Image: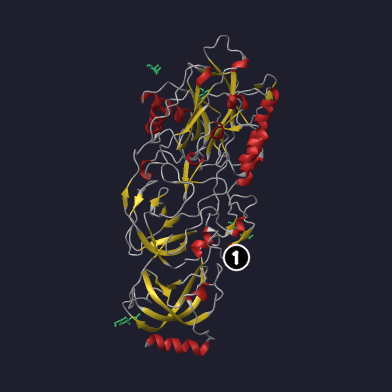
Amino acid sequence: MANLVRFFALTASVAVSSATTIAEINGPKFLSPFKEQTVSNVPGIITAKGPDGLWIRSTRPDRDERTSESLYVFGHTFGANLTVGDSIVVGGKVLEYRSNKDYIYLTELSAPVLESIVSSGNNVKALIIGKDTRDPPKEQYSSLDGGDVFAVPNNVSQISTANPALQPQKYGLDFWESLSGELVTVKNPTALTKPSQYGDTWVVGNWKVSGRNDRDGLTMTDKDANPEAIIIGTPLDGSKNPTNTRMGDSVEEITGIVSYAFGFYRILPTTAIKVTKSQKPAVPKTTNIKSKGKCDGITFGAYNVENLAATSAHHPALANHIVNFLNSPDVMFIQEVQDDNGVANDAVVSANLTLTALTAAIAAAGGPNYTFTDIVPVDDQDGGAPGGNIRVAYLYKPSLIRLYKPNPGGPLDANEVLKGPTLKYNPGRIDPANEAWTASRKPLVAQWEVIGKKGAEKSDTFFTVNVHFGSKGGSSSLHGDARPPVNGGVEDRLEQARLTANFVKNILSEDRNARVITAGDFNEFTFVEPLSQYAKISGLKDLDAVVRIDKLERYTYLFDMNAQQLDHMFVSETLAKRSKAEYEHVHVNTWTEYAAQVSDHDPSVARLDVCA
Ligand SMILES: *[C@@H]1O[C@H](CO)[C@@H](O)[C@H](O)[C@H]1NC(C)=O
Ligand SMILES: *[C@@H]1O[C@H](CO)[C@@H](O)[C@H](O)[C@H]1NC(C)=O
Ligand SMILES: *[C@@H]1O[C@H](CO)[C@@H](O)[C@H](O)[C@H]1NC(C)=O
Ligand SMILES: *[C@@H]1O[C@H](CO)[C@@H](O)[C@H](O)[C@H]1NC(C)=O
């Protein structure tokens, strides 16, 4: 009665449109045509209740698949005396809500007024995704992406201003928007990546997917960034999702409400999800790639060791990976090595203690006695965790490999390719003063020779470039307002790629048969502009493509819904042409639960014939 009184008080003061359906409120686009308007006489059956409101499903659906038939009714106390199955008539103000300007708006009915309870105990059935609905689209996110969610330039338009008509059969965001507020069931869910610290877990159900890798995660490929995946968010009943879920875990059937929060469409499950089965074996097998101990079979490992300081607890675990999973490669390209006192923000920049601790841990794990080389950066100039002074470094087996005529450069010395080719500084950094490297790691170039071959001439040398390009920090989400989404730092990486590629090009123009290996954390995918330019300018070949690793098994990192590849090796034509090249990504970290991962990246290992 009190509510009815409020209702009549409202009608007296505000122009109220009458008898509005939920489909009309949602409309066929992202934004409601009733935005900021007061509506009344909206009929619906309560399908679920949450801590701050409830969801209703229309009793007067239309036949337009674009218009969601469900709606979020926002109000802390509104549902106190109502239960799931109640058929009600409500009014209120239609709002488009987002907690951050980079998100997509969620349509909701706010300041709700209960106009009447029509009946109770109505049967509420969830829509089964892929059965009662169409399958989610598998490749594209939004009509505003121009066919490529990673196209440059980014953020050419925004969903909130363009407000495109939904095409749920073609675009993932449109599909999930067309189900906004709906109670749905996901049959036979599979977890795709590790959950967030809150237990938010990406899944796909038993619908058709693209990109499924051997571990049952989804790998991102060119123009297919897996919009068919959805996050399972915070359970409506206050229970907590597990935080130890792994890629490929089978999960019990999930029922919940389609919503949007924290930058993503999501399903809010009625209760916490439950893992029923995990993939076996829990850890990958040791790589089959083994050094031959001579120039026709030198092994190269690459590993982003995630903020490794001298006293880091993960030295032994990293050593275990390098020795027992990578077979102790002859040369290791290491990224993210911090200075000797880690993130203590003082004048210390040397990483001798950090690298000594790592090589000691490797020896203690039964591995070789590696020697290391790096160039100490200028304090606080290379980005990463403040005070950490991260840099790239090489480990190598001094009994087999040595620097060719060593002549280390300083942090500000720009390396040059001299006749031969040889290097002005060995090792040396690429154009360290160039502004493209502001707050970023400078690549470390070195020229090496294999020991043991008669009269190691310069024709027996090979070149390496160890990179750690700028991060993707500042990216907007694949489910965000900006289209194509902002790929944080992409302009910096493009310039970094050009500088590095041109340096390699200089080596190859001295000797087109030079043996050049560039590896590390490029923080980018091969099909995105910085790396397509990198390959084009340098003439180097993507080793994944050279050895024909299945596109779906090319991943070293998990982010949001995707298994993806940030870490690459590119080799010169002369190395690519030799039939014996081998390469593998060893999924020691992507396969484990979050608490057990040693680094956020998987290491990789290759074997190459570097004989002249
Ligand atoms: C719910 O019902 C109780 C008891 O009948 C009543 O005191 C209360 O005001 C009602 N609350 C709402 C929000 O209508
Ligand atoms: C995208 O561009 C719009 C319009 O210029 C701007 O308001 C918005 O902040 C940008 N988004 C991101 C994530 O940079
Ligand atoms: C680190 O090791 C190098 C090579 O042995 C040496 O030249 C340098 O002085 C060391 N730096 C510090 C700070 O100990
Ligand atoms: C590494 O060096 C130590 C000390 O010099 C030596 O005892 C050990 O045998 C060496 N290990 C290998 C694998 O060469």
Q: Which residue is mark 1?
A: 164
Q: Residue at x 50, y 20 (%)?
A: 297
Residue 433: give x, y in percent of width and height. 65, 36
- On screen, residue 18 versus residue 45, left or right, reads right
Check mark 1 vs ligand 2: CB closer than 8 Å? yes or no: no
Q: Residue at 38%, 30% (x, y): give it.
A: 320
Residue in the picture at 67% in, 30% down: 505
In the visual, does 509 lie left or right of 143?
right
Nearer to me, 372 or 368: 368
Give the colouring mode of the picture: secondary structure
Q: Is residue 83 above or below residue 205?
A: below
Q: Is residue 63 above or below residue 468?
A: below
Position of residue 561 measured from the top left corner of the image (x, y, whole percent): 46, 50
Compared to residue 170, the image places residue 502 above or below, namely above
Residue 468 in view, yes or no = yes
Disc 1 residue crowd, few under 14, some 14–19, many 20+, Cα 10 Å: some
Task: Name the quadrant of the C terminus.
Answer: top right
The residue type indicated by label 1 comes to: Pro
Instruction: Place residue 353 in its image quadrant.
Output: top left
The part of the image, by quadrant, that contains residue 413 is: top right
Res. 427 visible in picture? no
For the N terminus, give its image quadrant. bottom left
Residue nearest the viewer, comparing 205 with 335: 205
Q: Position of residue 198 (x, y in %)?
A: 39, 55
Q: Secondary structure at mark 1?
A: loop
Count the numbered circles shown. 1
